[in-house]
Amino acid sequence: MTTDQQPWLANPEWVRKKISGTPASNVETSRTSWLAGIFALVIGTVGLVLNGAQTGSQRSPSFLFLLVFPIIGIALLSWNVLLKIRLRRYSGTYFEMDSLPFFVGQYLSGRIHMPRLRGPLHLTLNCIRRTKSATRGLTGASTLTWDELIWRDEKLGAGSESAAQSDESTLRVEFSIPPDAPTTNSANPDDRILWLLRASATLRGIDFLQYFEVPVFAKTGVTTRPGYNDRDFYAPVAVSLPAHVPSGVRQVIIRPSPGAGTEFLFLANRHWGIAKGATAAFCVWTVVIWYFFWGSDPLSFSLFVFADVLLLYWAVWGWFSKVSAIIEDGTVTVRNSLLGIGKSKQVAYSDIRQITSPIASQTGQGVEANPAYAIFLQTSSQGAITMATGLRNAGEVGYIVEKIKAEIKIPALK
């Protein structure tokens, strides 16, 4: 068969069923970060040497901007040095696949061959959408790469196996792949779908961290992707989540509604990470305004105060906003409120086509991202209605979605 019919045959490592590990999830980004680090360090250092002492003594805001550049440069260069050390220390690590390829709706399995390590390994299987866009800046044209996390599952690796006299060990890997997940797709180099297996362990000295790009396809080959002219091109890709009964700290409470139905109360604690960041930003920004802009011209001062008020609102919203979804009498009533003040929206059961729970936002990129899930009611007449955002526990989100589907009588995905 040709590579068009079996696209996994185009990669020699996949054909050998042995995938070499890399210390970075995106090799192209790690290469450009060398240049970015050197550029930021040089610009910041020259600026501080020429103007730093003067602007610092005058309490000028430009001193803060000059100081940011060398800090960013040092951070980028330090990260790249760490990648180089990790590459040398853990060279030879590879993932041996049990089959070629892995199919959606089935299992990904194999063994990671690596140096003998002390401590458990944390494993994640990630579906990534990698997009590229051309940008033009002060240094000319460049390409911006962004990794969007579509789906993730994680496990704590069991104990590794090793021979008594061997410096190497192996770790068994097995993940279940959702049947509605997008497949590996590189037809458009500016909009790719990748599947990355990540293995990590916290060690003394240099932590173990390796990435393996694995082939995940449908039995018919590659699933179709929305084109640039499709209205769903920029929409989050929704993949079914595993349903786990919540334990510990919950973000959603399920209770009877006043009308003998069911109420799903999405608590404010799902946004407390944002609330902490917004509160810290509000405090820092308030100090900056007082230190640098107190007594400046009214227009500049008012603009910075307006930004401070927006940060305060963002913090209050993160600490106290709630969403209630009441399912009863053939309708779903979604109410968003802040400190008891809000508005409601109703939708009939018959108008709901499906309930999806994609990753709507993320902190960081791709494999390293901290995802936040949303729950949408996909309706025929009103489009996508947001039921809740900011949910962090994928298992709890999957459980809530299945409960809502059962209430509305929407069949679960097979």
Image (cartoon, rainbow, N blue to C red):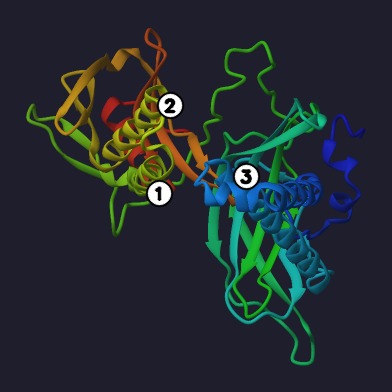
- Residue 107 in sight from this viewpoint: no
Q: State the residue lying farthest toward the top.
A: 381
Q: Is residue 35 left or right of residue 119?
A: right
Q: Could you say which quadrant of the image residue 307 lies in?
A: top left
The x and y percentages for residue 164 are 74, 91
Front label number (2 vs 1): 2
* Amino acid found under the numbered disc labelled 2: Ser
The x and y percentages for residue 142 are 80, 31
Looking at this view, is 268 or 406 the one in front? Answer: 268
Mark 3–mark 1 distance (CA, rounded to whole Å) = 17 Å
Q: Residues within 10 Å of mark 3 (few under 14, many from 20)?
A: many
Mark 3–mark 2 distance (CA, rounded to whole Å) = 38 Å
Q: Residues within 10 Å of mark 1 (few under 14, many from 20)?
A: some
Compare marks 3 and 2 and give the one earlier in the sequence: 2
The x and y percentages for residue 22 are 78, 58
Residue at the spot 54% in from the left edge and 28% down from the top edge = 236
Under tag 2, what secondary structure? Answer: helix
Residue at the spot 27% in from the left edge and 15% down from the top edge = 347
User: Which residue is labeled 1 in the image?
Assistant: 393
Front label number (3 vs 1): 3
The x and y percentages for residue 297 are 41, 26
Under tag 1, what secondary structure? Answer: loop
Disc tally is 3
Compare marks 2 and 1 and give the one earlier in the sequence: 2
User: Which residue is labeled 3 in the image?
Assistant: 366
Q: State the residue lying farthest toward the left.
A: 258
User: Which residue is labeled 2 in the image?
Assistant: 300
Say which mark, if any, is on residue 3: none
Compare marks 3 and 1 and give the one earlier in the sequence: 3
